[in-house]
Image: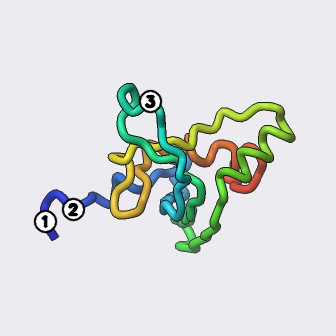
Amino acid sequence: MSFEDFVDERSLISHDALGTKEIKIKLLEVEDDVSDHNWKFGIRIKVKKILVTIKHLQTQQIEEAEFDLKDIEKEMKEKRHYSSTNRWVQTTDVKNGYILSTRHTLLISDAVALDYIVI
């Protein structure tokens, strides 16, 4: 592995507010939509499906669930008449198939609002 391919594991993991859980998100599927604002926002992909892994640090228990963000966004718009979802992710925010921790909250905010994920 070259130095350019090395990714620090800490950059892929986010924590809950109390520091009792670690969260990691793997990119499973992207949509074919092409951003028409490449010049302004850089090269981005539109995330469709993710795999969320939550590790409970006290018990070492691991939970995994697959989420279709497109379906969750649609449900959020129907139930709440509003969605703040931004499924567009910079290609530089994806490392080895995982999404950097800085993007976690934005990607799972609707799933949390609909109680699919309880943190």
In the image as oriented, which residue stretches furthest toward the left? 2
Amino acid type indicated by mark 3: His
Describe the element under mark 3 as helix, strand or loop. loop
Outermost residue, top direction? Answer: 40
Q: Residues within 10 Å of mark 2 (few under 14, many from 20)?
A: few
**Numbered label attached to residue 37:** 3
**Vertical position of residue 119 compared to residue 26: above or below:** above
Label pair 3/2, CB-CB below 8 angstroms: no
Neighbourhood count class around disc 1 (C-alpha, 10 Å): few under 14, some 14–19, many 20 upward: few
Give the label, 3 or 2, closer to the camera.
Answer: 3
- Checking the image for residue 2, the label placed there is 1
Mark toward the viewer: 3 or 1: 3
- Amino acid type assigned to the residue bearing label 2 in the image: Phe
Q: Earlier in the sequence, mark 3 or mark 1?
A: 1
Residue name at image x 40 percent, y 63 percent? 97
Asked whether the residues under the numbered discs 1 and 2 touch, taking CB atoms below 8 Å apart as contact, a structural biologist would say yes
Q: Is residue 37 left or right of residue 17?
A: left
Instruction: Identify residue for label 2.
Output: 6
Q: What residue lies at 63% left-to-right and 66% top-to-bottom? A: 66
- The CA span between labels 1 and 2 is 7 Å
SS under mark 1: loop
Q: Left of 39 or right of it: where is 50?
A: right
Judge by depth and name the residue closer to the eye, 29 or 24.
29
Q: Please identify the quarter of the rendering in which residue 2 is found.
A: bottom left
Where is residue 54 shown, x and y percent of the image?
56, 63
Q: Secondary structure at mark 2?
A: loop
Considering only order in the chain, which callout, 2 or 3, is on the residue closer to the N terminus?
2
Q: Residue 51 in the image: x percent, y percent?
A: 56, 64
Residue 112 is situated, as x and y percent measured from the top left of the image, at 69, 48
Can residue 54 be seen by looking at this rendering?
A: no
Horizontal side, residue 92 vs residue 5: left or right:
right
